[in-house]
Image (cartoon, rainbow, N blue to C red):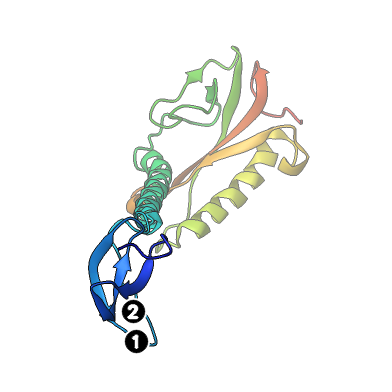
Amino acid sequence: MEPRSSSADWYRDPSDPTGLRYWDGSHWTDHRAPLATQIPFQPVPDAFGPRPRWPVWIALGSVAFGMLAWVIIGVVLVAVAVTSYLPQRLAIDNTPALRVGSCLTDLDGDVVNAPPEVDCDRPHRAEVFANFDLPAGPYPGRDKVIEMTSDACKTRFEVFIGRDLKLSELNEYFVWPIEATWQTNREVTCIAFDYADVKGTLRNADR
């Protein structure tokens, strides 16, 4: 016997008037319960559709985001390591090849180990204007070494070019020593460069 209403719900059991039985909308199920003031909830397979899967997607998204974050951190660490290594390698391999008056076509390559040196009468953009050693003693730290190098190169820039760096059309580039070679190599190389090709020496260029 079907219930008066065909909608899925709990109804009085036709085979047991003292109890309840669940009607899924088309037939009676095996789910029964005693007649009570509060009808118990009894889930019926497939009666309410599949469970939502958004918690699974959230979990997968969290895992993917975590992996991406670690990849980004790894790339940043590698970039920092490479950036820190390059100037050190230049200082470690520093040779006395570049001396005052050496002209370079540019500063894009390995200035120290493979300097693009050229005769100053040919087009070039840079020229070495000073070589000197920083004072001996305990290594003062990278920042201090760069500060000492920059100050000393600026003073020598004005002497060689004939104009203060702040007022010059030219700019400077320098190579400084590092802690690993401090006891045996404290040499600094100062280089003046132009943003366009020039011919002849930059000594006393006054510009």
Labels 1 & 2 near each other (Cβ < 8 A): yes
Expressed as whole percent of the image width and height from the top left, the position of residue 204 reads 71, 29
Residue 84 seen in render = yes
With 84 as the anchor, is 146 left or right in this view?
right
Q: CA distance from mark 1 to mark 2?
A: 9 Å
Q: Give residue 56's quadrant in the image.
A: bottom left
- Which amino acid is tagged 1? Ala
According to the picture, the residue beneath numbered tag 1 turns out to be 36
74 or 98, nearer to the observer: 74
Residue 179 seen in render = no
Residue drawn at (52%, 59%) of the image: 144
Q: SS at mark 1? A: loop
Q: SS at mark 2? A: loop
Expressed as whole percent of the image width and height from the top left, the position of residue 68 reads 39, 49
Q: Which mark is residue 40?
A: 2
How many residues crowd mark 2 within 10 Å: few (<14), some (14–19), many (20+)?
Answer: few
Expressed as whole percent of the image width and height from the top left, the position of residue 88 reads 39, 45
In the image, residue 25 above or below residue 104: below
Residue drawn at (37%, 65%) of the image: 3
Expressed as whole percent of the image width and height from the top left, the position of residue 149 reads 54, 50
